[in-house]
Image (spheres, grey):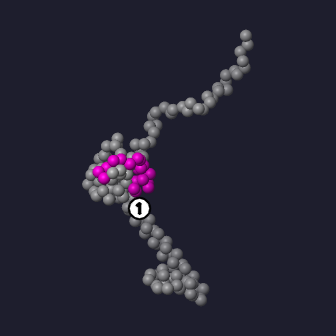
């Protein structure tokens, strides 16, 4: 086994240690290292999402919400590369801000298109549409006895 990292070293120590204290120390050090690494990954992901969210806010204010959003239109709206815009749009989908819709025709064929989730949400001020397949609910206060002639 080639030892390349600190965790490799600790893993080798934990696997070969005959002293229980040394084995316990190595296992505890591995756990501490993994926890620290996970924390750094989460912080990096949070920073990336914060930057993407800021760009999505700028994109939202600069584009026509009636049209599907592509990475090219997003990039042109805020002055970033289409690759960066694509990554931002994917992050928006992952966080529920955007929804992927049917592809649209681009310069070189069909391209992915997105819409803001808030644009697709139902308008809460509209009256709900009644389902014609549901049976009407009878009013329990009405007399259900048949009328006598």
Quadrant of res 28: bottom right
Residue 22 inside the magenta-drawn segment: no
Quadrant of res 85: bottom left
Left or right: 59 with respect to 16?
left
Which range is magenta? 90-108
x and y percentages locating residue 118 in the rendered image: 41, 44
x and y percentages locating residue 56 in the rendered image: 35, 52
- Count of marks overlaid on the render: 1
Residue 97 inside the magenta-drawn segment: yes
x and y percentages locating residue 97 in the rendered image: 41, 50
Say if 19 sits above or below 102 in the image. below
Left or right: 76 with respect to 53?
left
| Residue at the far front in the pictured view | 109
Asked if residue 8 can be seen in this view, the reply is yes
Q: Which residue is mark 1?
A: 46
Q: Dot 1: few (<14), some (14–19), or many (≥20) neighbours within 10 Å?
A: few
52, 108: nearer the viewer: 108
SS for dot 1: helix
Q: Residue at x 35, y 41 (%)?
A: 66
């Amino acid at each position: 086994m080639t030892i390349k990292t600190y965790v490799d070293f600790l893993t080798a120590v934990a696997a070969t240690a005959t002293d229980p204290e040394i084995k316990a120390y190595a296992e505890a050090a591995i756990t501490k290292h993994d926890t620290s690494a996970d924390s750094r990954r989460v912080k990096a992901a949070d920073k990336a999402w914060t930057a993407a969210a800021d760009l999505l806010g700028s994109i939202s204010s600069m584009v026509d919400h009636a049209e599907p959003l592509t990475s090219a239109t997003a990039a042109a709206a805020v002055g970033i590369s289409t690759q960066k815009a694509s990554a931002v749009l994917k992050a928006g989908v992952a966080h529920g801000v955007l929804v992927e819709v049917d592809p649209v025709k681009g310069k070189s064929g069909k391209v992915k298109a997105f819409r803001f989730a808030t644009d697709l949400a139902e308008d809460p001020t509209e009256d709900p549409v009644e389902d014609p397949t549901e049976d009407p609910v009878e009013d329990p206060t009405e007399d259900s006895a048949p009328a006598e002639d």
